[in-house]
Amino acid sequence: NFIKSNKLRTYFGKVVKTENKYLGMICAFFQNNFVPDKIDLKILDILSATFAVEETKINAQNVSLENEVRFKSLFENSTIGIYRSTPAGKIVFANPKFISLLGYDSLEDLQKIDINKQLYVNPKNRSEFRKILESEYTIHGYLENLKRKNGSIVYIRESSRVVKNELDGNILY
């Protein structure tokens, strides 16, 4: 066995655990009659805590990645057109449904347009839409006519909410 073949005589160890999960033990084995002092025990506590913190970080990263995959799938496969634009009228991102609804070939193609001038049939409506968002921070069921790439009109019901910069309160999207 491991202990006999290595002539181990003493060991000390510490359980490694996160808030809700036992991960195992960290142990130190010795071939003599070693008796740990307070510093040795403190080092073991630090190592145990470090392993637990790293495990927690790894779990958080995994959860974040899983959430990102779920969000991306929802976004990419939605039957509803979704987009984000800046107050200045630039599209930051859009899902495939929104891109195809407007007749564009790609997100990059759609990002070339100025929403304020090229998307709304009546550009004044974009201005009105922005004023409502700036004062109420959210809109539900706003009826609008948008121009497709080929010039035809599509009728939509738009809902939107403001996203602000947490530091200065400026509207980002």
Image (tube, helix red, strand yellow):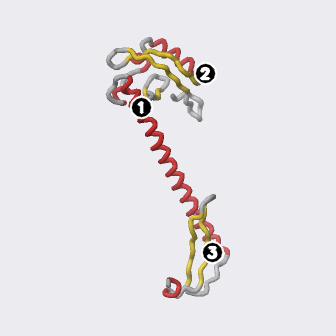
Secondary element at tag 3: helix
Which label belongs to residue 136? 2
Label 3 with label 2: CB-CB less than 8 Å: no
Q: Nearer the viewer, residue 125 or 90?
A: 125
Residue 51 percent across, percent down from the top left: 56, 63
Instruction: Tell me the kind of residue under disc 3.
Output: Asp
Q: Could you say where residue 32 lies in the image, as x and y percent from the top left?
A: 58, 87
Inter-mark Cα distance, 3 to 2: 61 Å
Q: Is the residue 63 above or below the residue 83 in the image?
A: below
Residue drawn at x 52%, y 49% is 63
Mark 3 or 2, nearer chain start: 3
Q: Residue at horizontal 48%, vertical 12%? A: 124
Check disc 3: other Cα within 10 Å, few if <14, some if 14-19, many if 20+: few
Q: Which mark is residue 95?
A: 1
Instruction: Please indicate, yes or no, whether residue 136 appears anywhere in the rendered image.
Output: yes
Local packing at callout 1 (Cα closer than 10 Å; few below 14, some 14-19, many 20+) is many
Report crowding for label 2: few under 14, some 14 to 19, many 20 or more residues within 10 A (C-alpha).
few
Which amino acid, by three-letter code, is at mark 2? Answer: Glu
Front disc: 3 or 2: 2
The residue located at (56%, 80%) in the rendering is: 29
Q: Residue at x 61, y 87 (%)?
A: 33
Closer to the camera in the image, 148 or 110: 148
Of 165 and 31, nearer the camera is 31
As drawn, 22 above or below 115: below
Q: CA distance from mark 2 to mark 1?
A: 25 Å
The part of the image, by quadrant, that contains residue 47 is bottom right
- Residue 9 image position (x, y, % from top left): 58, 86
Q: Which comes before the other along the chain, label 1 or label 3? A: 3
Q: Position of residue 42 (x, y in %)?
A: 64, 70
SS category of the residue bearing label 2: helix
**Amino acid, disc 1:** Asn
Q: Which residue is mark 3?
A: 40
